[in-house]
């Protein structure tokens, strides 16, 4: 039993030493470093992509909010410029319809 355990232990140590030897050799080290650099770059690009997606979602929400606000302002403008509202304001300020000689037509520029 003891010899069997020592053999497996020596095999594991032998495999570990072989891996260390290959990784730290002149052929293995550039490969390992290249894989590490590629992995780090992949993670960084992925994080940047996720960050940009969050920014895009935020901008889209802001655009929708501004569109709704613009529609509300157009509706408010329409209410304020309605004929009935203008007549009420004219009564409050004692205004009357202009006479024919008071109207001046300004030609539009082309």
Image (tube, grey):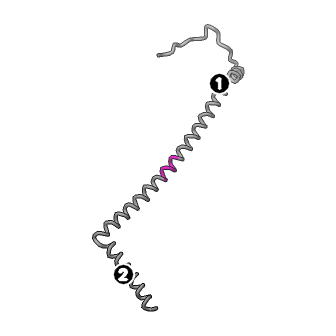
The percent coordinates of residue 85 (x first, y second) are 69, 24
Which residue position holds label 1?
81
Label 1 SS: loop
Residue 95 in the magenta stretch? The answer is: no
Q: What stretch is highlighted in magenta?
A: 50-56
For this rendering, which residue is in front, 12 or 31?
Answer: 12
Q: What number of labels is visible?
A: 2
Residue 52 drawn above or below residue 89: below
The percent coordinates of residue 74 (x first, y second) are 61, 30
Residue at 68% in and 21% down: 83
Tell me the quarter of the picture where residue 94 sits.
top right
Label 2 SS: helix
For this rendering, which residue is in front, 68 or 80?
Answer: 68
In terms of secondary structure, what is the magenta stretch mainly? helix
For this rendering, which residue is in front, 54 or 12?
Answer: 12
The percent coordinates of residue 27 (x first, y second) are 29, 69
Which residue position holds label 2?
14
């Amino acid at each position: 039993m003891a010899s069997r355990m020592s053999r497996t232990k020596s095999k594991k140590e032998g495999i570990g030493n072989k891996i260390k030897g290959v990784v730290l050799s002149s052929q293995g080290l550039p490969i390992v470093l290249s894989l590490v650099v590629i992995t780090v770059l992949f993670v960084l690009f992925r994080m940047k992509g996720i960050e940009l997606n969050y920014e895009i979602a935020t901008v889209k929400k802001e655009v929708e909010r501004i569109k709704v606000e613009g529609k509300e302002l157009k509706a408010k403008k329409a209410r304020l410029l309605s004929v009935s509202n203008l007549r009420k304001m004219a009564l409050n300020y004692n205004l009357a319809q202009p006479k024919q000689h008071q109207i001046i037509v300004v030609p539009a520029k082309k």
